């Protein structure tokens, strides 16, 4: 299996971990009556639960582009040491992004996001030019 695919699988597992990191404080904050209800009205999470939800949502969004990059690299037979390293950089950035977002660190969170985005962009560019 291509390294990029392994990293994609790990990124998927990170998404699952982020879901649980968000769901536990959200359930504690809102209570079972709300979290198991029909949710006819939007539910707003605040504080730590809200930050963890937004970090999880952000990973869902970035995972789409990263998945596209992995598919293009692997199916295009463009895997290289640099695309593999880029995939690991993406994953490391996403792992670091969670505590950075949850703790409310300004600027650093955006820098971490940028590193992950840049790694994904590099994978796409490498697939096209190599």
Image (cartoon, rainbow, N blue to C red):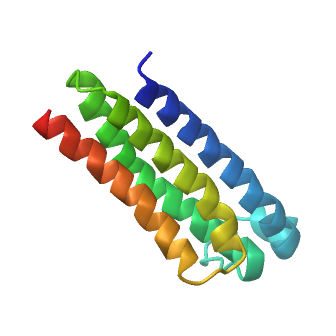
Q: From what the image shows, is residue 121 above or below residue 26?
A: above
Looking at the image, residue 94 lies above or below residue 71: below
User: Height in image: 111 above or below 117?
Assistant: below
Image coordinates for residue 87, horizontal then vertical, percent: 43, 40
* Image x and y of residue 11, in percent: 54, 41
Query: Residue 74 or 17: which is nearer the viewer?
Result: 74
Direction from residue 102 to residue 69 in the image, left or right: left
Q: Measuring 78% from the left and 68% from the top, which residue is drawn there? A: 26
Q: Quadrant of the C terminus?
A: top left
> Could you tell me residue 65's position as x and y percent?
34, 50
How many tags in the picture?
0
- Which residue occupies the extreme top position in the image? 1
What's the residue at 48%, 71% (across, down)? Answer: 111
The foreground one among 30 and 95 is 95
In the displayed structure image, the side of residue 116 where residue 12 appears, left or right: right
> Is residue 1 rendered to the left or right of residue 96?
left
Residue 109 visible here: yes
Q: 7 above or below 110?
A: above
> At which x and y percent is residue 16?
66, 44
Who's the residue at 59% across and 84% down the image?
106
């Amino acid at each position: 299996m291509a390294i990029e695919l392994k990293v994609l699988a790990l990124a998927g597992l990170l998404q699952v971990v982020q879901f649980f990191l968000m769901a536990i404080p959200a359930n504690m904050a809102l209570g079972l009556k709300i979290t198991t209800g029909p949710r006819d009205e939007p539910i707003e999470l605040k504080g730590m639960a809200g930050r963890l939800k937004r970090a999880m949502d952000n990973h869902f969004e970035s995972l789409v582009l990263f998945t596209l990059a992995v598919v293009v690299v692997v199916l295009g037979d463009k895997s290289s040491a640099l695309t593999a390293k880029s995939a690991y950089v993406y994953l490391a950035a996403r792992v670091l992004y969670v505590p950075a977002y949850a703790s409310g660190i300004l600027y650093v969170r955006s820098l971490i996001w940028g590193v992950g985005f840049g790694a994904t962009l590099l994978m796409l560019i490498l697939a096209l030019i190599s």
